[in-house]
Image: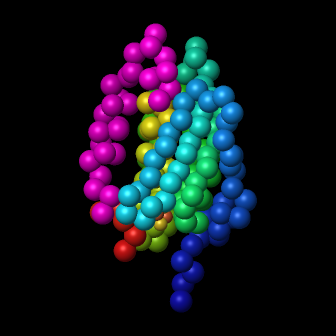
């Protein structure tokens, strides 16, 4: 039988990057999949002038694929601007992991949702800044995903 997970997934699961929680975050994204019950918290530090993510950590109560997806997504968005980070999709996460089994695709969606939620929270804490339309657009798109469609089989 072919192995279920790529070596990269297993490596991130065993040695997750940026795990934990930033003490004084500029944005927090709390997301969960109501079907499998897995939860993810993303905390970010943002440079207000450049709107760049200077630090990011994750805490995931979930399966190995969710932990590997969280780990990879933190590496992908660290150093990016908020709008660049918003463009990182679950497909990018899956590509970076070298693939995920179809029943585990929803775990990567959780990572995409976590980043978007943290970015929205950042703007919510900065009344002096206007929330870019791309943020609302992305959240709407992610909200439209039926959790049952991305639920584990
Ligand atoms: Fe639900 Fe992986 S996040 S099983």
Residue 48 place in picture, x, y as percent: 58, 17
Q: Does residue 137 appear left or right of residue 98 in this picture?
A: left
Q: Residue at x 46, y 10 (%)?
A: 128
Question: Which residue is at the far top?
Answer: 128
Magenta segment, which residues?
121-148
Residue 85 in sight here: no
* Relative vertical location of residue 102 with respect to residue 75 in this rendering, above or below: below
Q: Residue at x 41, y 60 (%)?
A: 106
User: Does 83 lie within the magenta span?
Assistant: no
Q: Residue at x 29, y 39 (%)?
A: 140
* Relative vertical location of residue 101 with respect to residue 2 in this rendering, above or below: above
Residue 105 place in picture, x, y as percent: 43, 63
Q: Does residue 10 appear left or right of residue 66 in this picture?
A: right
Question: Which residue is at the far bottom?
Answer: 1
State the residue in front, 91 or 117: 117
Q: Residue at x 59, y 37 (%)?
A: 43
Residue 59 place in picture, x, y as percent: 61, 50
Give the number of callouts.
Answer: 0
Q: Quadrant of the C terminus?
A: bottom left
State the residue in front, 31 or 83: 31
Residue 74 in sight here: yes
Residue 124 place in picture, x, y as percent: 44, 23
């Amino acid at each position: 039988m072919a192995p279920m997970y790529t070596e990269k997934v297993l490596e991130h699961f065993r040695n997750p990057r940026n795990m934990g929680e930033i003490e004084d975050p500029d944005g927090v994204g709390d997301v969960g999949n109501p079907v499998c019950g897995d939860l993810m918290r993303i905390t970010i530090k943002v440079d207000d002038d450049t709107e760049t993510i200077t630090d990011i950590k994750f805490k995931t109560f979930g399966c190995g694929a969710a932990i590997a997806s969280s780990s990879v997504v933190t590496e992908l968005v660290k150093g990016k601007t908020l709008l660049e980070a918003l463009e990182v999709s679950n497909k990018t996460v899956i590509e970076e992991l070298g693939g995920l089994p179809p029943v585990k695709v929803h775990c990567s969606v959780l990572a995409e949702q976590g980043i978007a939620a943290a970015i929205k929270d950042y703007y919510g804490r900065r009344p002096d800044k206007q929330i870019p339309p791309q943020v609302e657009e992305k959240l709407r798109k992610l909200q439209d995903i039926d959790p049952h469609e991305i639920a584990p089989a």
